[in-house]
Amino acid sequence: MTAAVDAGELDVPVPAQVVVERPKNRDHGDYATSIALQLAKAAGRPPRDVAEVLAARLRSEDGIASVDIAGPGFLNVRLAEAALGQVARTVLAEAASYGRNDALTGQAVNLEFVSANPTGPVHIGSVRWAAVGDAVARLLEASGAKVTREYYVNDAGVQIDRFAASLHAAATGAPTPEDGYAGDYIGEWAQRVLDREPGLLDRPETEAIERFRVLGLQVALEEIRGSLADFGVDFDVWFSEASLTESGAVERALTRLREQGHVYEDEGAVWLRTTDFGDDKDRVLVKSDGTGTYFLSDAAYYVDKRARGFDRCIYLLGADHHGYVGRLRALAACAGDDPDRTLEVKIGQLVNVLQGGQPVKMSKRAGTMVTLEDLVALTGVDAARYTLGRSSADTTMDLDVDLVTRQTSDNPVFYVQYAATRAASVLRNAAEMGIAEPTPGEVDLSLLSHPRENELLLALGEFPRVVATAAELREPHRVARYLEETVAKAAQRFWDECQVLPKGDEDIAPTTAPRLLLWRATRTVLENGLGLLGVSAPERM
């Protein structure tokens, strides 16, 4: 397109991006684009005339077998077989880096996710964000961003008072306080506090409850950290809400907001005029009695993140936080930022865990919820992470334990992992037969001309685009669906129709070496893709 504009064949601004898609009907070619229709108005010419100009340019490019014009001006492009073989060479050359890009290089991103209250084990709602959030972080890193995974510890406020009182009650055998926390874990954690400070119950009640607050939070965070680490999720920063006041971050945020001119006082309270930026009402920062609100903590936390040098702050929140989107965007604007550039808020929906077609019963230990440990015990880490990551987080999902633990092709995680295992098996069998894995530069990859080989090569060639799109949209489910619906399916058809290794007394065929490389490239893409989801690509199953 740029060459056509430079040559004066088209008089249009060159767009920053051109959408190229895989046609659903393979008879229409390998790739298709509607760019000619988009440029027609600016060019002042019929779409088919623009398409003819672009088609002529494309036909002269190496690796293009044909370019057809369809309908009002769609371009259907078919690649030459030799060019398709080059896909495998590229995958093998880039290896673990294949699929990565530099679209976000130089960006410092703060990604906050999970952030469950430290008053109990990690529950199923937070588990979804653990899987999805960590995959989003991996995708952003694959696009060049420097990502800080952050857990916001809500260690201040009424819920922590209730937590401390509940631990004290459990330790003394008293009834659970009203609005307190129950479940066997409270008794377990209370005992762990007493193990650390055996004489604690000899103290006055007020002092004892305060120690239960401090030591109970330690126990809770150790448990949460351990559960998440076992799930393959590690955070770079565990940020204390209480530290916002202790560090002066609250006062700094108030100063920043006052300087921007959006703070006012009314009826003895301090308000932030968030309605200036689309919020449905102004928000109280400091109550008339002088105590700060939760929104003041939110404000201090956001301003502190920006002060720490993050270009973009991404919040992954649960379904009950839907109302936060507008107020956080207004907050960013009140702080003098452009929320379209510095802030993102993603809302995740609920997960229902089913077994035998029925909801899984509540955890005996937690009493009121299905915990991360419960889920992992039922499914394993890989199955849980893949299944939670393969559906768009903004939709409610049912996680069927019976399905995700079944070793059959109707189980998506098994289907993808088995494809990776099969690739490893083919390469292993070749080595056992004395057939060394060939060097890509010494193999004629144009021999990969079978329709199933071409289909698989096209599938592998899509991986960088899928990764870039998934990172841009913060949607790791796009990677999962691509792996199972595009790569694994194409690999299965390749396996069914294209023999790789000789049988019996057969000679090694000319296609053996290129097909071995195709299996190696397939294994690489599956490993890289599963790695972005935090899921293993086993050698054997």
Image (spheres, grey):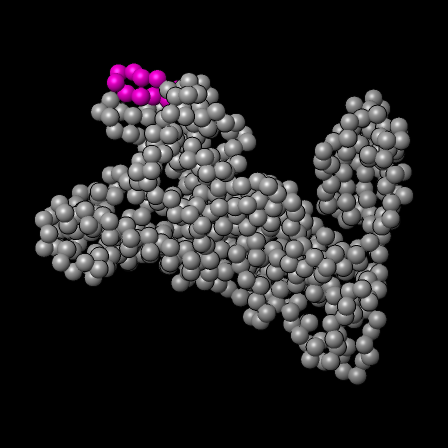
Q: Does the stretch in magenta take in 265?
A: yes
Query: Quarter-wise, where is residue 234 in the image?
Result: bottom left
Q: Residue at x 76, y 35 (%)?
A: 34
Is 497 on the left-hand or right-hand side of 420? right
Q: Residue at x 52, y 41 (%)?
A: 109
In the current view of this chain or complex, which residue is farthest to the bottom? 505
Q: Residue at x 81, y 80 (%)?
A: 506
> Which range is magenta?
264-273
Is 396 on the left-hand or right-hand side of 436? left
- Nearer to the camera, 197 or 128: 197
In the current view of this chain or complex, which residue is farthest to the top? 266
Residue 469, placed above or below residue 442: above
Residue 451 seen = no
Is 57 on the left-hand or right-hand side of 329? right
The quadrant the C terminus occupies is bottom right
Q: Residue at x 79, y 56 (%)?
A: 86
Residue 214, placed above or below residue 490: above
The quadrant the N terminus occupies is top right
Query: Quarter-wise, where is residue 527 in the image?
Result: bottom right
Residue 5 % position (x, y): 84, 30
Dominant secondary structure, magenta: strand
